[in-house]
C-alpha cells in the first residue's frame, strides 16, 4: 500500500485518485483553492467530473505540509501552471518521493517538456510521466484504459506501473520520454484542428486527413528532437491522437467545434475551460520554426488562433499546397540513416 497525494483537483487528478483509492492505497488530494475542496466535501463530487462520487476515504487538504512524506506525488494541473506550483511545493516533497506528471504540454518560451520543468524545480527526485489515451470521465468509472509510463529511471517507471495497474487500468513502460511527452502534448493541437473541421460541417474524410497528416507532423518534429520512431505508432502517439480527436469528452475538440461555428478562439477557450491545444499550438509553432521542421497544419492553426486567420481559408491553403510524396518525415541525414537501419533490421 502506497501513500499518494494528487496535486490539483482537476478531472484527471481526481480520476487517478479514485483508481488508486480503489486499489487500496492511501490517497490525498491537495489544492490551493479551498473552495474546490469544499465543493467535494459538501456534495461528494466535483463539478469538473460531474456524476462521479468521491468517497470520504480520500483525504482533502490545502495544507502543503501534507505533501511531505508521501511515496508518490501526482502532478495533475494544467501545464501552464506546472512550474509555479512546483516551485511552491518543492520544499515539501521528500527526496525519496516519486513524482508522476500527467500534465500534457510544452512550456512557453523555453519549449521544455513538463518532466524537464519539474526536474528543474524539484531536483534529485525521480520524475515519471504517465500519458496516453485516457479521458478522466471514463477512467474514473472503471472503463478499461491503457496508458504508458516513461522516465529517465526505468526502475521508477516500473514502480509506478506496479502501483497503478488495476483490473481496469493497464500501464506499459516506454523508455522514450521525449517521444511520449511530445506526442501527449502535440496531439492536442491536432485535436483542436479536428474540432474546427467538425464545427465547419466537414466529414470523416477531412478528419482522417488531419489526423494522419497530424501524426506526420508530430513524428517529424519528434525525430528532429531525438525521439524514437516507434513511439508515435503507440499509445502516446496515434493512440492518444485518436481518442482526443474523436471523443465528445475532448475539451480540445469541443473548443475547435465552437471556433469552426464562428466563435472567437478566445471565447471558445473561455467557454470550454482548460484547452491545452490552444497554448501548445503557439509553443509548437515556435519550436518548429526553431528546429526547421515543416508543420503546415500547425502553422495554419496558429494563423487562425493568433493572427486572425479564417478556417475556410486555412483549409484552402492546406489543400492547395504543392504536390508531394507521402512519406517525407526523414529530412535530415541522421533520419535517413535511421530509416535505412530500420529497413535492414
Image (cartoon, rainbow, N blue to C red):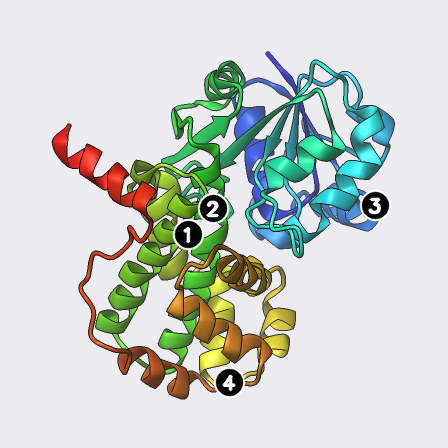
Residue 221 numbered mark, or none: 1
Q: Residues within 10 Å of mark 2 (few under 14, many from 20)?
A: many
> Of callouts 1 and 2, which one flags the residue occurring earlier in the amino acid sequence?
2
- Between label 3 and label 4, give the one nearer the viewer: 4
Disc 1 versus disc 4: distance between alpha carbons? 24 Å
Q: Position of residue 92 (x, y in %)?
A: 83, 25
Q: Secondary structure at mark 4?
A: loop
Front-most of residues 174 and 200? 174
* Residue at position x 47%, y 28% in the image: 150
Residue 65 numbered mark, or none: none
* Labels 4 and 2 touching (C-beta < 8 A): no
Disc 3 versus disc 4: distance between alpha carbons? 40 Å
Is residue 83 in view from this perspective? Answer: yes
Q: Secondary structure at mark 3?
A: helix
Residue receiving disc 4: 309
Residue receiving disc 2: 182
Residue 97 falls left or right of residue 250: right
* Residue at position x 25%, y 78% in the image: 322
Q: Quadrant of residue 275?
A: bottom right
* Residue at position x 43%, y 23% in the image: 166
Q: Secondary structure at mark 1?
A: helix
Amino acid at each position: 500500500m502506497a501513500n499518494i497525494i494528487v496535486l490539483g483537483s482537476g478531472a484527471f487528478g481526481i480520476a487517478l485518485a479514485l483508481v488508486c483509492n480503489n486499489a487500496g492505497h492511501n490517497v490525498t488530494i491537495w489544492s490551493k483553492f479551498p473552495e474546490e475542496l469544499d465543493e467535494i466535501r459538501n456534495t461528494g463530487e466535483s463539478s469538473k467530473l460531474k456524476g462521479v462520487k468521491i468517497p470520504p476515504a480520500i483525504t482533502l487538504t490545502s495544507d502543503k505540509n501534507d505533501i511531505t512524506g508521501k511515496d508518490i506525488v501526482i502532478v495533475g494541473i494544467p501545464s501552464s501552471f506546472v512550474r509555479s506550483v512546483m516551485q511552491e511545493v518543492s520544499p515539501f516533497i521528500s527526496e525519496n518521493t516519486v513524482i508522476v506528471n500527467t500534465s500534457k504540454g510544452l512550456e512557453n518560451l523555453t519549449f521544455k517538456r513538463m518532466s524537464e520543468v519539474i526536474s528543474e524545480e524539484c531536483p534529485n527526485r525521480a520524475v515519471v510521466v504517465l500519458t496516453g489515451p485516457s479521458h478522466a470521465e471514463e477512467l474514473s468509472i472503471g472503463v478499461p484504459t491503457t496508458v504508458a509510463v516513461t522516465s529517465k529511471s526505468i526502475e521508477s517507471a516500473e514502480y509506478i506501473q506496479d502501483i497503478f495497474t488495476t483490473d481496469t487500468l493497464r500501464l506499459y513502460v516506454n523508455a522514450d520520454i521525449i517521444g511520449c511527452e511530445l506526442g501527449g502534448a502535440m496531439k492536442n493541437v491536432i485535436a483542436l484542428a479536428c474540432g474546427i473541421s467538425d464545427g465547419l460541417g466537414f466529414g470523416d474524410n477531412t478528419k482522417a486527413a488531419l489526423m494522419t497528416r497530424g501524426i506526420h507532423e508530430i513524428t517529424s518534429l519528434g525525430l528532429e528532437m531525438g525521439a524514437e520512431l516507434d513511439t508515435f505508432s503507440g499509445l502516446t502517439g496515434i493512440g492518444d491522437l485518436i481518442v482526443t480527436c474523436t471523443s465528445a469528452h475532448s475539451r480540445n475538440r469541443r473548443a475547435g467545434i465552437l471556433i469552426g461555428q464562428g466563435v472567437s478562439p478566445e471565447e471558445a477557450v473561455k467557454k470550454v475551460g482548460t484547452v491545452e491545444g490552444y497554448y501548445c499550438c503557439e509553443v509548437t509553432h515556435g519550436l518548429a520554426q526553431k528546429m526547421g521542421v515543416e508543420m503546415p497544419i500547425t502553422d495554419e492553426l496558429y494563423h487562425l488562433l493568433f493572427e486572425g486567420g479564417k478556417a475556410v481559408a486555412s483549409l484552402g491553403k492546406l489543400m492547395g499546397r504543392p504536390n508531394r510524396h507521402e512519406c517525407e518525415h526523414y529530412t535530415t541525414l541522421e533520419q535517413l540513416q535511421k530509416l535505412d537501419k530500420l529497413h535492414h533490421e
